[in-house]
C-alpha cells in the first residue's frame, strides 16, 4: 500500500477500482511514477490509463476481477485473501443492492465463504463500526438536509467549519450519502463536502432511472450509474448550484 509519506519511484504500481488517476487522491502522482502500472477496474468510464489494463465493466465489483485473476494464475487462497476479496465485493456493491449485481457475484462470494470469509463480520466492521466524529457528521448532514425538484432530489452539505469543529476528516463521511438518498420519493441523493483546500467533493447516489455517472463526468469525475462522485474547484454555494442544476437537466 502506498502511503502519503512513501518514497518513489517504484518498480510497479497496482491500481484497483479507479477509473482515472484523479480518483487516487494525493498518492495518484506518486503511483504514476512507477516503471510499470497495472490497473484493475470495473467502471464503464475507465479512461484506459496505466501500462496494463484489466477492465471488465460487466463485473459488479473489482474484487470479482481479482478473484478471477488469482484463479486463472492458480495461486493459493486462504482466509485472509478471501476476507479481503469478499469485503471488496460487499462494499463495491453496496451490500449487493446495486443493479449491476448478478448471479456470478453471489457465486464468487460463496466461493470466498468456502475459504472462511465471513460476511457478517465484514459487514459489522465496515458498516456498523464508526468513529464518534462520523456519527456527529451524520447528524450535521441530516440537520442540513433539503429536498428540491419536486422531491426528486435530496441533498445536504458538510462545511469546512463542521469538519473543524468536530475534528473530523473526509473519511468520516463514508456512507452518509446513503442516508441522504433515503428520503421517500427521492430519485437522487447528493452530499457536498467543503474541504480545507477550498474544493468541494460531491457524492451522488441514485435509484434506477437516473445515471449519476454522466453528471459526475461533466465535472471530471465518474463512477457507476447508481453511485458516482466528483470534485469541484469552486466555492460551496457555486458547487451546490452547479450540481443541482446538472441533476435537474439529467
Image (tube, helix red, strand yellow):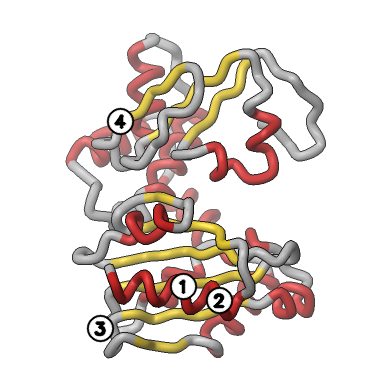
How many C-alpha atoms fall within 10 Å of the one at disc 4: few (<14), some, or many (≥20)?
some
For disc 3, the marked residue is 185
For disc 4, the marked residue is 56
Q: Which mark is residue 242?
A: 1
Residue 19 figure quarter? top left
Question: In this view of the protein, can residue 154 be seen by the observer?
Answer: yes
As drawn, the residue found furthest toward the top would be: 74
Q: What secondary structure is marked by label 1?
A: helix
Q: Earlier in the sequence, mark 2 or mark 3?
A: 3
For disc 2, the marked residue is 238
Q: Earlier in the sequence, mark 1 or mark 4?
A: 4
Residue at left 25%, top 65%? 210
Locate residue 99 relative to residue 242 in the image: left or right. Answer: left
Find the distance from the CA under tag 4 to the CA under tag 3: 33 Å
Q: Are marks 1 and 4 in contact (CB under 8 Å)?
A: no
Find the distance from the CA under tag 2 to the CA under tag 3: 26 Å
**Residue 59 point in image, percent of width and height:** 28, 36
Residue 162 figure quarter? bottom right
**Residue 216 point in image, percent of width and height:** 41, 58
Residue at left 60%, top 70%? 193
Q: Earlier in the sequence, mark 4 or mark 3?
A: 4
Image quadrant containing the C terminus: bottom left
Amino acid at each position: 500500500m502506498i502511503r502519503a509519506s512513501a518514497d518513489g519511484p517504484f518498480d510497479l504500481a497496482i491500481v484497483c477500482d479507479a477509473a482515472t488517476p484523479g480518483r487516487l487522491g494525493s498518492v495518484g502522482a506518486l503511483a504514476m511514477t512507477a516503471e510499470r502500472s497495472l490497473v484493475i477496474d470495473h467502471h464503464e468510464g475507465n479512461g484506459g490509463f496505466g501500462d496494463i489494463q484489466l477492465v471488465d465493466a460487466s463485473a459488479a465489483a473489482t474484487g470479482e476481477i481479482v478473484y478471477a485473476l488469482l484463479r486463472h494464475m492458480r495461486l493459493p487462497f486462504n482466509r485472509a485473501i478471501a476476507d479481503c476479496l469478499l469485503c471488496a465485493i460487499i462494499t463495491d456493491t453496496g451490500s449487493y443492492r446495486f443493479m449491476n449485481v448478478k448471479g456470478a457475484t453471489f457465486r464468487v462470494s460463496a466461493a470466498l465463504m468456502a475459504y472462511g470469509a465471513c460476511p457478517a463480520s465484514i459487514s459489522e466492521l465496515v458498516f456498523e463500526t464508526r468513529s464518534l466524529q462520523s456519527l456527529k457528521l451524520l447528524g450535521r448532514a441530516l440537520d442540513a438536509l433539503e429536498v428540491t425538484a419536486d422531491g426528486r432530489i435530496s441533498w445536504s452539505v458538510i462545511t469546512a467549519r463542521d469538519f473543524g469543529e468536530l475534528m473530523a476528516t473526509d473519511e468520516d463521511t463514508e456512507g452518509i450519502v446513503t442516508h441522504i438518498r433515503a428520503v421517500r420519493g427521492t430519485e437522487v441523493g447528493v452530499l457536498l463536502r467543503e474541504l480545507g483546500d477550498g474544493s468541494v467533493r460531491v457524492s451522488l447516489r441514485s435509484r434506477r432511472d437516473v445515471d449519476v455517472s454522466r453528471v459526475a463526468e461533466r465535472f471530471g469525475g465518474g463512477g457507476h450509474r447508481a453511485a458516482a462522485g466528483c470534485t469541484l474547484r469552486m466555492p460551496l454555494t457555486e458547487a451546490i448550484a452547479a450540481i443541482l442544476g446538472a441533476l435537474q437537466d439529467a
